[in-house]
Amino acid sequence: MTFAITAIALTAVSVTLSARASYVGGKTQEIEFKRAAEEERLASQSIELQRREELNRALAANVIGQSMSGISGEGTPASIALKSAKTASVSEATIGLSEKLKRAQYRRQGKNSRQAGYMTATSTLLKGATQVGQLSSAAAATRAETPATAE
């Protein structure tokens, strides 16, 4: 009888610890994905700042080159500069969207990891409850089969 109670208690403790580990593991993964998304946001801001500085330097060099060569800011050179500025803007928007999508993917992965941890913990608890129930019914059956000694 004592063995059955010990087995039930150990199973319950084991299942509880396993479920807790799954729960914490899911939450930890979510935190890591959120951290990765934040790092990606900071990196993309830094890269965007560098791209803008390079674009500004290139545009400034074009303006200086045109003014030194005596070309006025009207007509074909101006339209070329406008077209290149528009192209750079579209490129920046595409890169920005790509980086936003990457960060959103990290956040989704974090939420999915958390949910997977919750589901694994729930599954472990249900399996453990089944095991405890089986051990309890086996212990009850053993008690019923064992004749009581009256002394």
Image: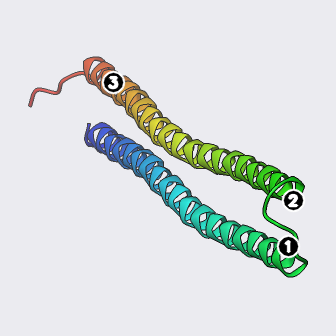
User: From what the image shows, is residue 105 above or below residue 127?
Assistant: below
Q: Residue furthest bottom?
A: 68
In the rendered structure, are the residues bearing label 1 and label 2 in contact, judged by CB atoms less than 8 Å apart?
yes
Q: Dot 3 surroundings within 10 Å: few (below 14), some, or many (20 or more)?
A: few
Choose between 125 and 145: the one closer to the eye.
125
What residue is pinned by disc 2?
77
Choose between 33 and 62: the one closer to the eye.
62
User: From what the image shows, is residue 63 above or below residue 30?
Assistant: below
Mark 3–mark 2 Cα distance, whole angstroms, equals 84 Å
Measured as percent of width and height from the top left, residue 97 is found at 64, 44
What residue is pinned by disc 1?
66
Q: Residue at x 40, y 32 (%)?
A: 122
Measured as percent of width and height from the top left, residue 135 is found at 36, 29
In the picture provided, is 147 more to the left or to the right than 92?
left
What amino acid is found at the position of numbered circle 3 in the picture? Answer: Gly
Q: Residue at x 26, y 24 (%)?
A: 143
Task: State how many labels appear.
Answer: 3
Of labels 3 and 2, earlier in sequence is: 2
- The quarter of the image holding the N terminus is top left
What residue is pinned by disc 3?
133
Q: Secondary structure at mark 2?
A: helix
Measured as percent of width and height from the top left, residue 92 is found at 70, 53
Q: Residue at x 29, y 43 (%)?
A: 9
What amino acid is found at the position of numbered circle 1 in the picture? Answer: Gln
Q: Single out the mark in the foreground, 3 or 2.
A: 2
Q: Secondary structure at mark 3?
A: helix
